[in-house]
Amino acid sequence: MSATKARVVLVLLSCLISAATGLVLSRGGGEQKSAGRAKPLIGLSMDTLKEERWQNDRDLFVKKAGELGAEVLVQAANSDDTRQIQDIEALISRKVDLLLIVPHNGAAMAKGVRLAHDAGIPVIAYDRLITGEPLDLYISFDPVRVGEQQAQYLVDIFKGKGKKKIVRILGAKTDNNAVLMKVGQDRVLSPYIKSGDFSIVHEDWAENWKPENAKKIAQAALTRVGAFDAVLAANDGTAGGAIQALTEEGLAGKVVVTGQDAELSACQRIAAGTQAMTIYKPLKALAGLAAETAVKMARGRPIVAKGELDNGAGKVPSILMEVYTVTKANIDSTVVKDGFHSREEVYRGLVAGK
Ligand code: BGC
């Protein structure tokens, strides 16, 4: 049974219990629990706030939820599963009407979902899927599309230019997104690997997506392989780490480096020519839609999600948003035009460096 169906059944069941006992129970029970409160209360449990992207997500979500009349309690676990479970327990004890989780480890956070559901609190997985436990909703950018677009960029720029050697720096193995991004990359790269045009000469997972771990992977590749043409880096943090390693060898700007998130520092590197591309994820749209959906659910209102994704415990109602490739050529017509970064900010490093 899907999580939504289970919720509907639970709500029906709770109405029956209510008729018999006067007790109102409802898994989507924001309405009942917040009845004594002026505003719905939403819990946001985050893996980390140590990356620019997640600070943006938090700020945009809290702002939008506030405009919609809700209050948000935010916790960040600093990439620690035990701490994230404690954060979730703390939010449950504050009797939040709904919980949004950005899991550090998608499998480990199934426990957090179970605890919330036991307390009648619906759960949305935000950006990263939680596996192995029925979920009420998953809302994210499409991670497979991220991987496909990163790989497609390499295919496009290397087309007709002979055989190319690629070093691949994957994200955190514990993050379902990193796994799905690899699926997207493999889908695009495999015909070129089969034909011998591309070879992946070195690859590894960057633990916790940390730039310093990515730097070590790039250094290992430099030592082991020597020269290569591209670093297929999973995000801007890992791209930054790889570019540091390349800079130390005088190779920055000579090796094509991919990324993801359109962080300011990455956009500056693209303008300066040391990073080739990034993936822009319009966070305002994601956080805004998540806030609208979360507030509705916290008020006990039904929501509609067209997509479905299997998380190993059944089909999860899912909303997956599109992502965009950013290069030097379209930086102004994408991130700048969208107000994600100002033109001044993007080109500031370049001017200062001249
Ligand atoms: C997100 C990326 C982010 C990475 C590291 C992934 O789950 O989708 O946008 O760069 O985590 O925080």
Image (tube, rainbow, N blue to C red):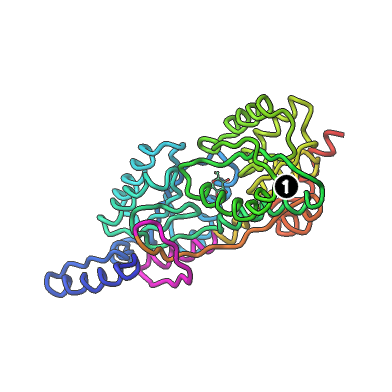
For badge 1, the amino acid type reads Asp
Q: Position of residue 286 (x, y in %)?
A: 55, 59
* Image-quadrant location for residue 38: bottom left
Find out if the beta carbon at label 1 lies less than 8 Å from the nearest ligand 1 atom.
no
Q: Nearer the viewer, residue 211 or 164?
A: 164
Going by the image, does 156 lie left or right of 13? right
Q: Is residue 85 left or right of residue 217?
A: left
Q: In which quarter of the image is residue 16?
A: bottom left
What crowding class fits label 1: few (fewer than 14 Cα within 10 Å), some (14-19), or many (20 or more)?
Answer: some
Question: Secondary structure beneath disc 1?
Answer: loop
Q: Name the residue under label 1.
A: 197
- Name the residue at 46% across, 49% down: 102
In this rendering, is residue 7 above or below 262? below
x then y, percent, for residue 254: 80, 36
Residue 223, above or below 341: above
Nearest the viewer among 163 and 67 is 163
Q: Quadrant of the C terminus?
A: top right
Whether residue 337 is in magenta: the answer is: no
Residue 221 x, y percent position in the rendering: 65, 30
User: In the image as oriented, which residue stretches furthest toward the left?
Assistant: 20
Judged left or right of residue 89, residue 226 is: right
| Residue 298 on the magenta span | yes
Q: Position of residue 72 (x, y in %)?
A: 44, 53
* Total tally of numbered discs in the picture: 1
Position above or below: 94 against 22: above
Residue at image position (39%, 72%) is 302
Segment tinted magenta in the rendering: 287-313
Point 26% across, 71% down: residue? 9
Residue farthest front in this picture: 195
Quadrant where the image shows the N terminus: bottom left
